[in-house]
Amino acid sequence: MSLRFTKMHGLGNDFVVIDTSVQVFTDTSERIAEMGDRHRGIGFDQLLTITASPTPEWAYAYGIWNADGSPAQQCGNGVRCVAAWLQRAGRISTDPVLLQSPSGTVEVRCLDDGQVTVNMGEPLFTPARIPFTAPDEADRYNLDVADGLLEIGVVSLGNPHAIVEVEDPEASEWQRVGPALSQHPAFPDGVNAGFVYIEDPTHLQLRVHERGAGWTQACGTGAAAAVAVLRRRGSIDAQVTVQQPGGELLIEWSGPGAKLWMTGPAQFVYEGEWLAEAQPGQPSQQSSAAPDKTSVISGKGRR
């Protein structure tokens, strides 16, 4: 049995998209991890499945899995790819539509220039809703991580994020701290660890270590989380460009009580066929080039 898929990326954060409304896909963690292997499989940061909506409220529903096979609740770059895929397939137009994600309803709109705007909802700071183990809600928390004390902000955009303000997101220290923070016991479900530098009130530099995927070229919810934490502290403006290794995202958030909006690109790479019956050590997928249908527009720490 073979499985058709589309390889896509949002600022280098790469995905495999599978339309499960027209083909059967057994989404076991073992199968997903096998497909996610960059040497013996297809390779991706996350796998996205598109299904028919269970109710008329949503146009479609989608699922998210990390490369290690673990489920994810939300992915900002991923939802833009889902929206772009649906538009190219002729299933949605440029009008705003609602999609069902693992973490709830998401509003998307495909723009004429190949960009996708997403309503990410209202950021959640209550520790129990992240989840994060803390007695009270605060703008800043001190956490023992990798033999040192780290000051963090925490927030959920459908998935948990810990944000650390630093002078250099690419410093070697954070390469060691990122994985440790992602697995810290204070976060029962793990956490995406973001390291952010404020260039000025409208520009950030960001690097994110994602739970279940490791260091990625870009993280959409990570960019949204960094803006939410810093905006709540009064450190940045309501409209911010977030620079990551893969490119830029525009994040807009006026503050507590308001919805957060993200705008960025989604690109097609190729169409492929996963040969599900292939044995270990044998070729496991075939691919064929597909034209690019979208375009890209032109990010203090340890205590």
Image: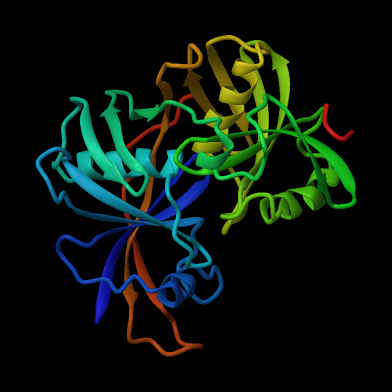
Using the image as rendered, state which of residue 138 and residue 252 is in the foreground.
138
The answer to whether residue 299 of the structure is visible from this angle is no
* Side of 198 where 248 appears, left or right: left
The percent coordinates of residue 206 (x first, y second) are: 66, 32
Q: In which quarter of the image is the C terminus?
A: top right
| Residue shown at the point (60%, 16%) measured from the top left | 231
| Residue shown at the point (50%, 31%) measured from the top left | 124
Farthest front residue in view: 135
In the rendered image, the vertical position of residue 6 relative to residue 216, given as above or below? below
Image color mode: rainbow
Q: In which quarter of the image is residue 293?
A: top left
In the rendered image, the vertical position of residue 55 relative to residue 40, given as above or below? above
The answer to whether residue 65 of the structure is visible from this angle is yes
Q: Quadrant of the N terminus?
A: bottom left
In the rendered image, the vertical position of residue 188 relative to residue 133, given as above or below? below
The percent coordinates of residue 21 (x first, y second) are: 16, 60
In the rendered image, the vertical position of residue 70 relative to residue 208, given as above or below? below
The percent coordinates of residue 41 (x first, y second) are: 47, 73
| Residue shown at the point (44%, 38%) measured from the top left | 76
* Side of 104 where 213 appears, left or right: right
* Side of 134 where 273 appears, left or right: left
* Side of 265 where 97 appears, left or right: left
The percent coordinates of residue 201 (x first, y second) are: 66, 10
